[in-house]
Image: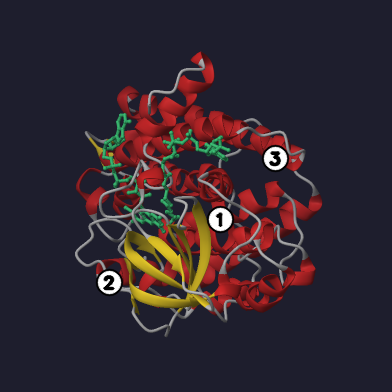
């Protein structure tokens, strides 16, 4: 069985349940994701058959109560699942992040009991796949300026606008869409595939997250039943609360990508000989490997502590921003350094490194860019918003 880096014995902080959950997902990733994912990424296609399997292994809504099809697990289990999925590919973790934190969570937290019972079990099992529409063509980091809006037409809402760069959009059965009501307040509304005027054009030609389906959500006079509005939240804090959960999962997830790259670099450095010796014997290569392991260890401790705080409902959005920003940057640097350790082989699909590196170029932008998370920390320190 694979032994990931655990230099500070963080495993000793995990419960038996955490380890069982992690092993199950790890085994599935080894069996079902790793052997095929490079082909899908090379062909810029999504392994849609994995969705049902992800439902079966409990990757969707692990912290959602069992009553709604979730597993009722804690936040550390959620984090560990994200790490294992991203060990396979960020695209696979993205599917689970969006489904869990950005689609199931808002329905669970802000929806009616009827909405929960209608959508959550189908989303948990993978029978349905969801998308989350916040970003617009002209409003990314500043979602509060969104233009997508709906009007009250008596027996229904009329939705107009568009969302861009939306994970799962082309394959989604439904989407949680954030749009302004007639008072200009941001509200969450559920839009289903097949509603007239709702289309999901595919975003082609990505060099990153090539095994993830990305697209637009376009609303052209879409009549949405009134029962599809999430009644229990108003304002930008609705979508941002969901992002706290997804960003937390990403902070764990990218560790999987980082560890895959680090492992490949260590193994290659020990096997590859130049000047009559393994390249692992050269100090410059040892420096790279030592720094990678140091950063992985720091990142592991950061998310473990954040998980404890989240379990206690004490993690602040700014703490989550710090972890997302730090761990994505760490993973990206490790991917770049590992790629160099492998020389030319580092760009080959025979190794996972280049794919992880390219994926992480999206992960550092989505769910709040690297700059935005820094400014959130800055605001937390100074009390002064750099966004106003
Ligand atoms: P601001 O005035 O600061 O706040 C508006 C209201 O929201 C509250 N709030 C939060 N609530 C919960 N969690 C948070 N993290 C929150 N941050 C702010 C705030 O208290 C306020 O509430 P109230 O009651 O006073 O109204 O908002 P702002 O307009 O100045 O913008 C703040 C900023 C820049 C931090 C925020 O808008 C931001 O985070 N921008 C980045 C956008 C982003 O992350 N987009 C992600 C889109 S989804 C995605 O990328 C999915 S990829 C998924 C995948 O494939 O894995
Ligand atoms: P912009 O906001 O235009 O930013 C451009 C640059 O300006 C960035 O470097 C940014 O840091 C910087 N900048 C912006 N404002 C400031 C400021 N105040 N101070 C300093 N610098 C600033 N969105 C969804 O809603 N749902 C999804 O499922 C989803 N999936 C995605 C999948 C992929 C593959 C990608 C790439 C993106 C996805 N996104 C999704 C969109 C993502 O959240 C946005 O791309 C991100 O929030 C940044 O918005 P933007 O691209 O419009 O960049």
Q: Quadrant of the C terminus?
A: top left
Q: Quadrant of the N terminus?
A: bottom right
Mark 1: which secondary structure? Answer: helix
Asked whether the residues under the numbered discs 3 and 1 touch, taking CB atoms below 8 Å apart as contact, a structural biologist would say no
Mark 2: which secondary structure? Answer: loop
Which residue has dot 2 on it?
Answer: 202
Q: Quadrant of residue 267?
A: top left
* Residue pictured at 68% horizontal, 57% vertical: 109
**Residue 176: x %, y % from top left:** 50, 65
Q: Nearer the viewer, mark 1 or mark 2?
A: 2
Nearest the viewer among 157 and 17 is 157
* Residue pictured at 64% horizontal, 72% vertical: 124
Mark 2 surroundings: few (<14), some (14-19) or many (≥20) residues within 10 A: some
Q: Earlier in the sequence, mark 3 or mark 1?
A: 1
Q: Nearer the viewer, mark 3 or mark 1?
A: 3
Q: Is residue 229 left or right of residue 314?
A: left
**Residue 363: x %, y % from top left:** 38, 47
Q: Earlier in the sequence, mark 3 or mark 2?
A: 2
Q: CA distance from mark 1 to mark 2?
A: 27 Å
Name the disc covering residue 103, or none.
Answer: none
**Residue 155: x %, y % from top left:** 54, 79
Which residue has dot 3 on it?
Answer: 310
Mark 3: which secondary structure? Answer: helix
Q: CA distance from mark 3 to mark 2?
A: 35 Å
Nearest the viewer among 284 and 213 is 213
* Residue pictured at 56% horizontal, 54% vertical: 82
Q: Describe the colour scheme in one phrase.
A: secondary structure
Name the disc covering residue 84, or none.
Answer: 1
In the displayed orientation, state which residue is furthest to the top.
382
Mark 1 surroundings: few (<14), some (14-19) or many (≥20) residues within 10 A: many
């Amino acid at each position: 069985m694979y032994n990931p880096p655990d230099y500070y014995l963080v495993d000793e902080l995990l419960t038996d349940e955490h380890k069982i959950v992690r092993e199950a997902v790890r085994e599935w990733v080894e069996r079902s994701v790793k052997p095929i994912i490079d082909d899908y990424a090379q062909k810029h296609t999504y392994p849609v058959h994995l969705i049902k399997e992800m439902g079966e292994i409990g990757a969707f809504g692990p912290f959602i109560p069992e009553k709604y099809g979730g597993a009722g697990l804690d936040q550390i289990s959620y984090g560990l699942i994200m790490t294992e999925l991203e060990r396979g590919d960020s695209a696979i973790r993205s599917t689970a992040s969006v489904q869990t934190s950005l689609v199931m969570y808002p329905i669970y937290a802000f929806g009616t009991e009827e909405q929960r019972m209608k959508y959550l079990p189908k989303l948990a099992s993978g029978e349905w796949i969801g998308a989350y529409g916040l970003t617009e063509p002209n409003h990314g980091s500043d979602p509060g300026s969104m233009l997508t809006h709906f009007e009250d037409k008596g027996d229904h809402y009329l939705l107009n606008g568009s969302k861009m760069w939306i994970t799962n959009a082309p394959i989604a059965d439904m989407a949680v869409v954030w749009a302004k009501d007639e008072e200009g307040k941001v509200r969450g509304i559920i839009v289903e595939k097949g509603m007239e005027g709702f289309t999901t054009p595919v975003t082609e030609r990505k060099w990153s997250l090539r095994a993830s389906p990305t697209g637009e959500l376009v609303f052209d006079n879409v009549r949405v039943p009134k029962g599809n509005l999430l009644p229990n939240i108003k304002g930008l804090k609705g979508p941002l609360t969901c992002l706290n959960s997804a960003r937390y999962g990403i902070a764990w997830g990218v560790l999987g990508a980082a560890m895959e790259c680090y492992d490949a670099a260590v193994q290659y450095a020990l096997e590859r000989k130049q000047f009559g010796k393994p390249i692992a014997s050269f100090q410059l290569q040892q420096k790279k490997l030592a720094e990678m392991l140091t950063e992985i260890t720091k990142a592991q401790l950061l998310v473990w502590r954040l998980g404890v705080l989240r379990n206690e409902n004490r993690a602040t959005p700014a703490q989550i921003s710090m972890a997302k920003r730090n761990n994505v940057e760490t993973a990206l640097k490790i991917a770049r350094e590992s790629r160099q350790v492998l020389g030319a082989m580092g760009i080959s699909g025979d190794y996972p490194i280049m794919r992880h590196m390219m994926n992480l170029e999206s992960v550092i932008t989505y769910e709040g860019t690297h700059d935005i998370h820094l400014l959130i920390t800055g605001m937390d320190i100074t009390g002064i918003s750099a966004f106003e």
